[in-house]
Image (cartoon, rainbow, N blue to C red):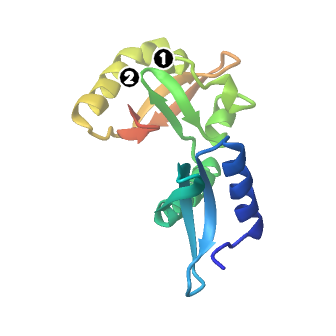
């Protein structure tokens, strides 16, 4: 019996009969007992008055395992960054796209949504905007890390605070960021 879940076979036969679906993802069992995650494509053909099911299986087990590994890896990384005792903020194309809890607290916020999508320059004090623009430009152009530099940021409540800023070029959701 190749069906890991006997209900999958019933579901497949029902779907074929209804003609509503041409593919489905299922788990099947190999002769040695190993599970394969497959996408099953099927069509019904009539030859000589008899119905035949033409099916093709594509093994997506490795792809699924890779997706699970990447998801778990991203989850572990995000958990690490979220609880890092240093403020971390990521901006891309001039907008804030991520900040951890420590950065939210530092900038007197209560949640990330208060910052996400806002221009990065909104939190940089006027006296430091030119140098910040140059540093950001260098990061994107040369992919150079910046050295630690004292700057002033403006918190949500308007308080101006002293910060030390270092930056590095990264990809965030497929886009250049720092």
Picture coordinates of residue 93 (x, y %)?
A: 41, 22
| Quarter occupied by residue 139 | top left
- Specify the quadrant that holds the N terminus: bottom right
**Residue at the location (65% across, 51% down)?**
83
Question: Mark number for residue 132?
Answer: 2
- Give SS at disc 2: helix
Quadrant of residue 99 within the rendered picture:
top right
The C terminus is located in which quarter? Answer: top left
Instruction: Residue lying at the far bottom in this picture: please name it.
Output: 32
Residue 166 visible here: no
Q: Name the disc covering residue 170, or none.
A: none
Q: Earlier in the sequence, mark 1 or mark 2?
A: 1
Q: Position of residue 67 (x, y in %)?
A: 52, 57
- Is 15 drawn above or below residue 177 in the view shown? below
- For this rendering, which residue is in front, 95 or 62? 62
The residue that disc 1 covers is 121
Residue occupying the point 47% across, 12% down = 126
Label 1, secondary structure: give it: helix
Q: CA distance from mark 1 to mark 2?
A: 8 Å
Seen in the picture, residue 172 relative to 162 is either above or below; the reply is below
For disc 1, the neighbor class at 10 Å (few under 14, some 14 to 19, many from 20) is some
Question: In the image, is residue 74 above or below residue 27?
Answer: above
């Amino acid at each position: 019996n190749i069906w890991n879940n006997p209900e999958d076979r019933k579901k497949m036969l029902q779907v074929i009969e209804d003609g509503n679906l041409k593919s489905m993802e299922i788990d099947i069992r190999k002769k040695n007992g190993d599970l394969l995650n497959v996408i099953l494509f099927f069509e019904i053909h009539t030859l000589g008055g008899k119905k035949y099911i033409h099916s093709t299986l594509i093994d997506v087990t490795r792809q699924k395992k890779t997706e699970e590994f990447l998801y778990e890896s991203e989850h572990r990384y995000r958990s690490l960054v979220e609880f890092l005792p240093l403020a971390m903020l990521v901006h891309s194309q001039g907008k804030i796209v991520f900040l951890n809890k420590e950065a939210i607290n530092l900038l007197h916020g209560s949640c990330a949504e208060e910052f996400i999508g806002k221009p990065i320059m909104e939190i940089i004090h006027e006296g430091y905007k030119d140098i910040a623009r140059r540093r950001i430009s260098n990061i994107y152009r040369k992919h150079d890390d910046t050295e630690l530099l004292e700057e002033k940021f403006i918190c949500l409540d308007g308080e101006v605070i002293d910060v030390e800023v270092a930056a590095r070029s990264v990809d965030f959701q497929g886009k250049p960021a720092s």
